[in-house]
Amino acid sequence: MLRTSRLWVRVASLIVGLALIVPTLATSTAAQDDGSVLRVQQITYPDVVDPQKSSFTSEITILALLYEGLTRLDDQQQTVPAAAESWEYNDDATQITFKLRPDLKYSDGSPLTAENFRYAIERTCDPVTAGEYQSILFDIVGCAEFAGLALDENGEARDYTPEEYEAARAALGATAVDDLTLQIDMVRPVPYMHTLAYTWVFFPVKAEMVARDPDNWWKSAENHVGNGPFKVTAIAEDQQWTFEANDNYWQGRPKLDGIEYVYVDDSSVALEAYRAGDLDIVSIQPPQVPEVEADPDLSAALVSYPSASTFNLAMNLAQEPFNDPKVREAFAYAMDRETLCADLRAGDCTPALSWVPPGVAGHIETDAFAFDPEAARQALAESTYGGPENLPEIKLYYNSDTSGRGEQVEWVAGQIRDILGVEVTIEPTDGTTLTALRKDSTSHPQLLFVGGWIQDYPDPQNWLSVYWTCNATFAERVGYCNEEFDKLIEQGDTTVDPAERLKFYEQAGEILVQDQPGPFLYNLTQKFVVNPAVTGYTPTASEVEWPGYLGSIMTIEKSS
């Protein structure tokens, strides 16, 4: 799952910023008195809140309140029943049948049936939708072919006839057998399909709501008729989304009466709003950690937990000099990850030497390419360049919209200079431009601080197959492809036995370490200050926007 850096709500000053949140003292007092509404800082305003198109955490955190898939993740990161009360695979895991709970309803009281979930799958695969997560359903019979209608054999855009469209749509392997039964046929064994069914692409938007305005339907609160624990009542663009409890949710009302997402990207403004009692949950950035830890009240309210995320020094392997594995090794050895986490990031991360993070199946322990200045210089000497003097110019890009990132980039450039004798040119770039540059290997920056991945669903397939296989969108963007790696991933993806499946993924992970497609740097630790009146939640590694919104949304509460 990608972190967005596209549209930031800029706040000119601390006073102006607070005015956006608390226009008057009376408003502030009322906010403090309303103990049943949770007020959460959000940093980035979403680009699109559409289950079949969204891909960023800032969008998913909204969708997770309004909609629900066939399954969900509990507070132990286990896949458990949600809209579906049960599921069953056939013997070779090429078919899965979900049984829905009886009497499911949308937030407006209308019936929710298997056909609504079938439509979600169809809409995800539809070439007209063309969502970024379309490919995770390509193992469903006909999905890849349906999605691929818009491209010719060379990957170029093509026109298709209405007859071709209808034939491809009809061939899709998702069938509403009856109101309570959804059958999905796969082109190969997919023993993790029940976990995929938790993701937002399965969220059952109502077709008639989408039809009102296919591209912009989601911008109107009245169009979000969902099946999740909350419903949206108001949308103030760039400022706030307001939610209230959904009385028609199958589990009943959550303990919270409402939630407000308040968009503030200035970390100082957000912390002051927390101190004033106008925000209950605020994200803490590395520069703020010393201040928070020195304050008795703030430190007591600090909540820290590991995130299922890995960040790396992203390299374009399609360009010199990073098409040379020895150069990549040299840069990997030159990274003092301990100092980066302890000093530059104020302890909000732990060093990473492999891709799949601790606590996720498929994680491997290794000390390969740990900080070693001598090994770094030796690797560079063994490269085709023979040393630093023959390297081409290297530009190090970073997102200049991200608070505190510049200091970290200066440190990375210093490591490369001091250890390897290589001068790099720092290129601060705004988030929108950087996102566009990262779309493919012809424009992807030579060197980027940072790239990375945040878990979509707790399965090694999401970490390895979705990101690093030759035809994966993200691997293509950085020019990485290893056929031996792909063969192991294919075996892992299609093996039904969990223990055997894990062996293939671990072997693939070892290859990734040896290839060093982009030096792994750290696993993030989430840090928030949370109002002590907020209880009943267990943070999970998948909850990167705030603690509790996935696994504890029914039990989290706020006392007055």
Image (cartoon, rainbow, N blue to C red):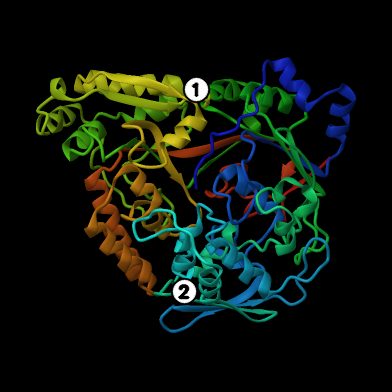
Task: Look at the picture and state if 140 lies above or below 538.
Answer: below
Query: In the rendering, at what x and y percent does residue 176 appear?
Result: 63, 78
* Residue 19 x, y percent position in the rendering: 78, 21
- Between the residue at mark 1 and the residue at mark 2, the CA separation in whole angstroms equals 46 Å
Relative to residue 433, is residue 258 drawn left or right? right
267 above or below 125?
Answer: above
Q: Is residue 454 left or right of residue 123?
A: left
Q: Amino acid at mark 1?
A: Gly
Residue 371 visible somewhere in the drawing: no
Q: Image point 28% across, 60% down: which residue?
A: 486
On residue 404, the disc is 1
Identify residue type, mark 2.
Val
Q: Which tag is nearer the camera, tag 1 or tag 2?
A: 2
Residue drawn 47% across the image and 72% down it: 142
Q: Secondary structure at mark 1?
A: loop
Q: Secondary structure at mark 2?
A: loop
Decide if residue 144 is on the left or right side of residue 518: right
Q: Quarter-wise, where is residue 296 in the image?
A: top right
**Residue with the mark numbered 2:** 141
Q: Camera-side residue: 483 or 502?
A: 483
Image quarter hosting the C terminus: top right
- Rendering quarter of residue 42: top right
Mark 2 Cα within 10 Å, few/some/many (few <14, many 20+)?
many
The front one of 476 and 213 is 213
Q: Residue at x 46, y 38 (%)?
A: 524
Residue 332 appears at what percent x and percent y?
Answer: 26, 34
Instruction: Categorize mark 1 by other alpha carbons within 10 Å: few (<14), some (14-19), many (20+).
Output: some
